[in-house]
Image (spheres, coloured by chain):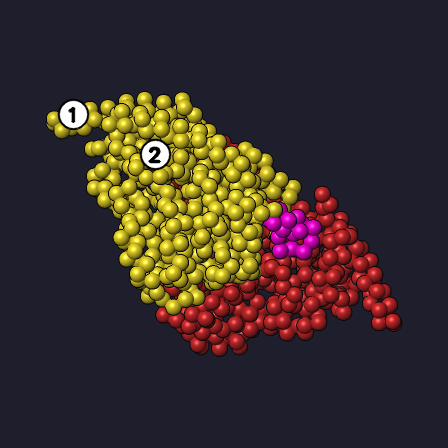
Chain colours: A red, B yellow
Amino acid sequence: MFAPVYLDWNATTPLDPGVREAMLPWLDGRFGNASSRHEYGRQARAAIDAAREQVAAAVGAHPTEVVFTSCGSEANNLFLKGAAALMKPGLVAVSAIEHPCVREPAKQLRRAGWRMREIAVDGEGRIEAGDWADTLAERPALVSVMLANNESGVLQDVAALAREARPSGAWFHTDAVQALGKVAVDFRGLGVHALTLSAHKIGGPLGAGALVLDKRVELSPLVAGGGQERGLRSGTENVAAIVGFGAACERVTARLAQEGERLVRLRKRLEAGLAAAGMRIFSAGAPRLPNTVFFAAEGLDGETLVAKLDRAGYACASGSACSSANPEPSHTLLAMGVEPGMARAAVRVSMGRDTREADVDGFLATLSRTVDALNTLTAVAVER
Amino acid sequence: MFAPVYLDWNATTPLDPGVREAMLPWLDGRFGNASSRHEYGRQARAAIDAAREQVAAAVGAHPTEVVFTSCGSEANNLFLKGAAALMKPGLVAVSAIEHPCVREPAKQLRRAGWRMREIAVDGEGRIEAGDWADTLAERPALVSVMLANNESGVLQDVAALAREARPSGAWFHTDAVQALGKVAVDFRGLGVHALTLSAHKIGGPLGAGALVLDKRVELSPLVAGGGQERGLRSGTENVAAIVGFGAACERVTARLAQEGERLVRLRKRLEAGLAAAGMRIFSAGAPRLPNTVFFAAEGLDGETLVAKLDRAGYACASGSACSSANPEPSHTLLAMGVEPGMARAAVRVSMGRDTREADVDGFLATLSRTVDALNTLTAVAVER
């Protein structure tokens, strides 16, 4: 198999070998329905309990606050629609740069009689203070602002926002899927009522996510049935994936500081090269994730560039790779006021534990050659 | 690890070694977000497409009719609540012996303004003709009747029910989770609009289920977001689990006839032994799954018996092991008119591809000893 250098860690990550070790017994001799009252069931239950403690510890929560779901998208939907189902229709406010799995359920609520407001961001992609004040003045019932943006890597001051929102009485949720494992995430410190996590963004497996939930928040389950996860998420628990999620949480937390510093150095090296090549780096003035660089070569099509880079041995993303085929320019950049032509040129590089200096240097050299070739083609096309 | 003989295959199954082989590459070198437009993403997409064909082939559906979900519970919830979300409130009719992941979403609809009707079953656990006629006369909008019951193993004539329901205009759904891999399941032959499947009941992994869906049925997604699965189920696809689901479908379909005959022989052997020991076998007069025996030793507590059998080396279930801790007697048996004392005595043995004659014989001998010991204890307790 042709294996380009992987620079798309915000889309998904290869399984951490230590995580795989933890999971493999549950794909081999060990198995069981955690609801079964025999030896197999008890072993499965114990494994889930242990993983719940690991996930809770990674974000400073209590294990009983962790509700396992099948993925981050499900956790975001569970919070918004699950809370709304037990309330009278009111205002749901989500930032204009949320992932589609927050924006779309908010739109579903709008179709069900709620009002929906998208909180504006400034040119750097941070929540815009005036629009935030206006939002709070409208007394939202539900607020969701992501901790780190999947495309730009911009970090929001969620602790301050949650504090400011408190008098409004809103339930405050934050999608921390991209933040976990890259920056410290502290459920209590943030002061939010709910927080979403995902395993496969941190070297864990696909198939496990979590909603960390303040017990005061009542939710109607999206998946109702056997009553698993305190009745908030029915369905036989995916033991292997949950065990892997726990192991991944423990591992990324243990190496967070060291890995964060290493990635910041790589990011600076990459950005220096991009700046020297005349690229525009989005949100360069905002606090950002250590691993993410969102940039554009003016006049080029991001999709085309990413396809050429892939063939030349570097796998990265244009716009958000988390959403399905969608030719629209990045909604994150449009919300930041970037003009559509420039937004269409955007390329995201996201790095991870396997990324090395040589990968950054190789990427920069390949990017330079690829951009030159595309510019030559464009010039020729224009001449004709 | 102490490993009792596993006789609880309706709760979950050990991973088929061939399925594990198919999955392992996706837990090792291979990975990717299927929405990513680079080599990793394309490989993931191709693997999902291949699995979709395998799942569709197992039930005679077209691959584009398969919507992957994280589990059977999610698929059942997606059908009922997803269809209802786009309709005016009406009547939802589900059989009285449905799994909680059908009954509970139906109850959620009732709280949201729908009428809910539970279709009665007769003493053998089959849909009761008179109540079914009455149900249809009320013109339900949504009907759900399971193909095979998880506890008794009773098969319903879903093809006939769906045909009879057609004039009412209802969308007809069947939960085929327990039927798949044990009896032939034919989406077109059944004439239903939607059908639920689950991987972990057929030697596949936890983390994958499917709703096979007639394209005329419009659903609002439970998990909205990036637009995966034709917009019906967002979230990064769990490639390894989906690949395993496909492999499991192919394997159980290939050995269905042979394995079905083998399990029927085992079931008859088990039932002959149970009858000789004076046990009552539920639904003995109805068409049932080849692998499932639901029985009771009058006067004993099923929970206690299952715990003793577990320690003596045989893992089976009392009532439904799919639902979480719940001291209530089996709702399937209560719906059949079995009196609560007898229902509380119920024990389920469900067999699978690893079950051998010696396991059945060993189980019968152990059961006999265990029941004698419990009866002695009870007699002593009564004397005192």
Residue hosting label 1:
B380
Ranked by sequence position, the earlier of labels 1 and 2 is 2
Q: Mark 1 against mark 2, which lies toward the viewer?
A: 2
Task: Give the numbered dot on residue A143.
Answer: none
Q: Residues within 10 Å of mark 1 (few under 14, many from 20)?
A: few
Instruction: Categorize mark 2 by other alpha carbons within 10 Å: few (<14), some (14-19), many (20+).
Output: many
In percent of the image, x 33 and y 66: which residue is there?
B113
x, y (%) of residue B379?
16, 26
Tell me the CA gap for discs 1 and 2.
30 Å
- Please name the residue shown 32% across and 29% down the image: B271
Which region is colored magenta?
B34-49
Residue for point 52% across, 39% down: B253
Residue matched to label 2: B293
User: Considering only vertical position in the picture, is B368 above or below A201?
Assistant: above
Q: Is residue B72 above or below residue B107?
A: above
Residue B123 image offset from top left, x and y in percent: 26, 43
- Of the pair A278 and B380, the residue shown nearer to us: B380
The front one of A199 and A124 is A199
Using the rendered image of the protein, determine whether residue B85 is visible from the camera's viewpoint.
yes
Instruction: Please report, as a chain letter, where disc 2 is located.
Output: B
* Depth check, front residue: A15 or B367: B367
